Amino acid sequence: MDIFDRKIANRLQRFGRLSSADLAQEVGVSVSTANERVRRMASGGEIRGWHAHLNPDAVGAGLCCFVLVDMTYDGEADACAALVTHDEVMELHHVAGAHSYMMKLRTRDTASLQAFLAEHVKPLPAVLRTETLISLDALKESPVMPVDGLD
Amino acid sequence: MDIFDRKIANRLQRFGRLSSADLAQEVGVSVSTANERVRRMASGGEIRGWHAHLNPDAVGAGLCCFVLVDMTYDGEADACAALVTHDEVMELHHVAGAHSYMMKLRTRDTASLQAFLAEHVKPLPAVLRTETLISLDALKESPVMPVDGLD
DNA sequence: ATTGAAAGAACCCCGAC
DNA sequence: GTCGGGGTTCTTTCAAT
């Protein structure tokens, strides 16, 4: 990824529906080149996918929380494989420190959070304990990540 | 948002570049209607934006971590306003419990994480203390959220 | 790899239901 | 609000550099 790829990727992660013409002009290459770069990044894995970012409240996913999960080594992989299948589990990270894993969840409300933990998390054999941090307000929740070497 | 809106939104958050023709067929409405629904959801705020999801490793943002931040009430709003301006801060949540805020950060490596905390977090007057959980592996990191009332 | 131009596909507007 | 058609814009392909 040279500077043009990075500029293109950075624009597209912010404005995914930018037309090739606008993109090409902003970055300073021809339309064909911009298209070719995008195609190459998409097939090469630098661009993982394209997504509409929904309003969580509008689709009944207004409750966001982070769940720290302690697991035994035995059955750990199975538990992770099961967890990632659920839409409620938006992120699952193996973390360093006092806890084994950290999940980001979205559910409708506290009742459905409780139900999800009781039905799909706590029954997993490897899961020893969970600790839930509830988000009272998401001041920022962006899919945009810093792209190295810009500005 | 009726069932058609929710189906459309759910498809578009997974495949943001779905053509109107495919979208219409999958959901069971005409192309015109699909387009009209998308336009209404985008202008009404149900769809917040469109984004390419980049490969963090490819753009030099391979280190992911979660930072718990303790703040004083005095200067809290200013600190939050400052934090959200940085691309490294992908999420900032006001959380219930022992800590005030929870941030999701992405940086190049531990050195740039250290630099970011030292330069842009700890100097904020309201910030008392931070606790950092480093992600060793992101098993799932998806922008897709559960949409209520499907299936 | 980059480019311009032509062919193909997608989107948007609009009048009718 | 939904639909289909026509005009416009965009994307893709391709031959040439």
Image: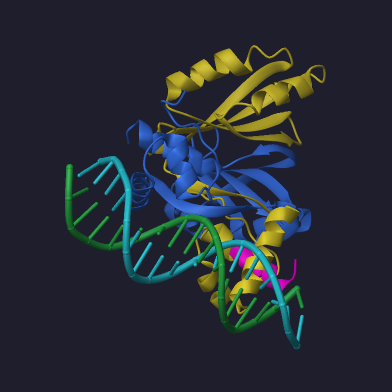
Chain colours: A yellow, B blue, C green, D cyan
Asked whether B61 or C11 is in front, the reply is C11
The prevailing secondary structure element of the residues shown in magenta is helix
Q: Vertical placement of A69 versus B89: above or below?
A: above
Q: Is residue A5 magenta?
A: yes
Asked whether B65 or A5 is in front, the reply is A5
Asked whether B27 or B6 is in front, the reply is B27
> In the rendering, at what x and y percent does residue A3 appear?
71, 72
Residue at 74 percent across and 28 percent down: it is A100
> In the rendering, at what x and y percent does residue B54 appear?
65, 54
Q: Provide the residue span drawn in magenta.
A: A1-10
Question: Is residue A137 visible from the viewing direction of this image?
Answer: no
> In the rendering, at what x and y percent does residue A17 appear?
50, 59
Please tell me how many numbered marks the rendered image carries: 0
Residue at 70 percent across and 53 percent down: it is B56
C16 vs B86, left or right, is: left
**Residue furthest out toward the right:** A74
Residue at 57 percent across and 48 percent down: it is B128
Q: Is residue B130 magenta?
A: no
B125 vs D13, left or right, is: left
Q: Vertical placement of A34 versus A57: above or below?
A: below
Quarter containing the N terminus of chain B: top left
Residue at 50 percent across and 64 percent down: it is A18
Q: Vertical placement of B139 versus A129: above or below?
A: below
Question: Is residue B98 visible from the viewing direction of this image?
Answer: yes
A145 vs B23, left or right, is: right
> In the rendering, at what x and y percent does residue B74 appear?
43, 51
